[in-house]
Amino acid sequence: MKLRYYQKDCISALDHWLRNNPSNPVCDLATGTGKSVIIAQLIKVICQQYPETRILCCIDTKELIDQNYKKLKEMWANAPAGVCSAGLKRKDLKNQILFTGIQSVYGKAHLIGSCDILIVDEAHMLSMKSGTMWQQFIKELQPTRVIGFTATPYRNDCGLIYTPSTNPKIPTLFGGLAYKYSVKQGMKDGFLSEVIPKTMTTHFDVSGVKTQNGDFAESQLQEVVNQKDKNQAVIDEIIKYGQDRKGWLIFSAGCDHAHELDLILKQRGYNGAVILGDTPDNLRDTYIVQFKNKELQYLINNAVLTKGFDAPHIDLLAAVRPTQSPVLWAQMIGRGFRIDEGKDNCLLLDFAENINRFGYIDEMEFTDKKKNNSDKEGVPVVKTCEKCESINPAGVRECKFCGHEFPPPEPMINKEAYGGAVLSTQVMPEWKDVDTMFVSLHKSKKPTPVLKVEYMCSNLERYFDWICLEHEGYARTKAIKWWQENTDIYKAKSEKVVDWILKNPNTIPRTIAEAVVLQEIIKKPSRIKVMQDGKFWRVLERDNRPPPPSCQPEQVDSGDFSEEDLNEIALEF
């Protein structure tokens, strides 16, 4: 099997981390980008280099256990691998490579024996809170290193899983982010399907529903959502948009709600099934096989088919479940990311208005700071095409989906537009001509400084790049890539810079002080592509081609540094 470029990069990043960093790494890879392939190749590479290494791959669903085991066997037929899973009716314990579920082994670490590397898929499910299955298992197993893979590196009880916990009672197991491959990049590369949002007329008022364990309390949520007239209206819209779609995946607000929606669809002549937490395993497996074989038009589930469920033909997602959990929302949307033959895109019917809570799905940032959901930063002003009812950026003149031309805008005052775009790519970025570029060292409240690259454009507009050369893991990897793409050693003029380049052929500085002194080799772009993200603007792309002859000659400024400052910084070499 030929690996994609980012899968190779991820394995290389992990290899570098394990050799140079004593802490446990996390890899953040978008749903549908092939974590099982990366895990299989990583295991194969480690065992080839270190034949005595004992590796345990632990997950929390039997579907993922089976998927990861089969992927390894596909890529390495003679792998000394086994499976320990009650759900799969296998009880291997002594294989060199063991795929297992936490529920099957959390009290049996002493039977498994030594473990050099523990790989945890869906690592956001791992909790080190005292008394949990994971905490007990890892404490007893005592693996040399732990490697985590996830598409959502966040937990409601402790924040980001690779930074110091926001809860003093829950220790952090992972020490940093080794690699990241985002939803946006996956769609740009053509490895993920685009998600197309439609404007829904059916909505729910959840303002009075209480919060429980970081999400809406399910009993109260069902009272609001599971109403006869609302259910009929929801099904009307699903049928309206789903007539020509291959597979519908519907997320309900509760078990009773799932059965009510199922009853209405069957009354309308559609064939499907309901999968809940208490659905017997054999029946659940049967429904999933029938759905993948397109014998069933739809599946309705209550937060069950959110991870480890792979059905690439899904091209309609109906979110009838409001949620406050960014992890659950990202996992729900991820079911539609996979590409499939004959699948152009995936429709998102967001009855629950979750998009308004979390913003663009391809730019969701999992942070440790509590955000006010009423502040809809990152949710763009958009308009609905009257012809195909797709959501478009407010500024476009024609629908990007059907080509319908919008009428010229009329002056409007204090009118609030519906904010329901689901992808940042559905907001139009802008190109800005760069007049001057400034380079400086930036210190914030965080201990590690960054390189600030400031672009001064027309009308005194300012935009910034933040280059994290002194950070570790994925942040450093991104900084190296930026430096390689945006510097030119032949621009070196001063003796100290030329001398440094001769002594350091790869020209990648380790410190911000070095980067500031080397700033003369940083290319000044003729223009930059920027896009608004809430209150701020982000630089998406630099055009490093020389400006037309009529433009002003290149200017690079040293920011806040005087010549004396630069000379003092140079002493650090």
Image (tube, helix red, strand yellow):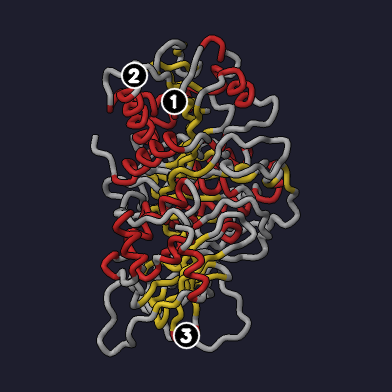
- According to the image, label 2 marks what residue? 51
Q: Residue 548, relative to residue 330: is it above or below? A: below
Q: Name the quarter where the C terminus is drawn.
A: bottom left
Residue 422 or residue 556, whichever sits in front: 556
Q: What whole-number distance in Å separates the C-alpha atoms at marks 1 and 3? A: 54 Å
Sooner in the amino-acid sequence: mark 1 or mark 3: 1
Question: Residue 12, position in %: x, y?
Answer: 35, 40
What residue is drawn where x is 42% and y is 34%?
19
Whether residue 296 is visible? no
Q: Name the quarter where the N terminus is drawn.
A: top left
Residue 190 or residue 135, whichever sits in front: 135
Q: Residue 471, relative to residue 173: is it above or below? A: below
Q: What whole-number distance in Å separates the C-alpha atoms at marks 1 and 2? A: 23 Å
- According to the image, label 1 marks what residue? 65
User: Hey, what amino acid is under mark 1?
Assistant: Ile
- Within 10 Å of the Cα at label 3, are there few (<14), some (14-19), or many (20+) other Cα atoms? few
User: Hey, what amino acid is under mark 2?
Assistant: Pro
Question: Residue 184, position in %: x, y?
Answer: 41, 56
- Within 10 Å of the Cα at label 1, are there few (<14), some (14-19), or many (20+) other Cα atoms? many
- Within 10 Å of the Cα at label 2, are there few (<14), some (14-19), or many (20+) other Cα atoms? few
What residue is drawn where x is 37% and y is 45%?
338
Secondary structure of the residue carrying tag 1 is helix
Q: What whole-number distance in Å separates the C-alpha atoms at marks 2 and 3? A: 67 Å
Residue 67 or residue 39, whichever sits in front: 39
Q: Residue 535, relative to residue 571: is it above or below? A: below
Secondary structure of the residue carrying tag 2 is loop
- According to the image, label 3 marks what residue? 409
Is there CB contact under 8 Å for labels 1 and 2?
A: no
Q: Nearer the viewer, mark 1 or mark 2?
A: 2
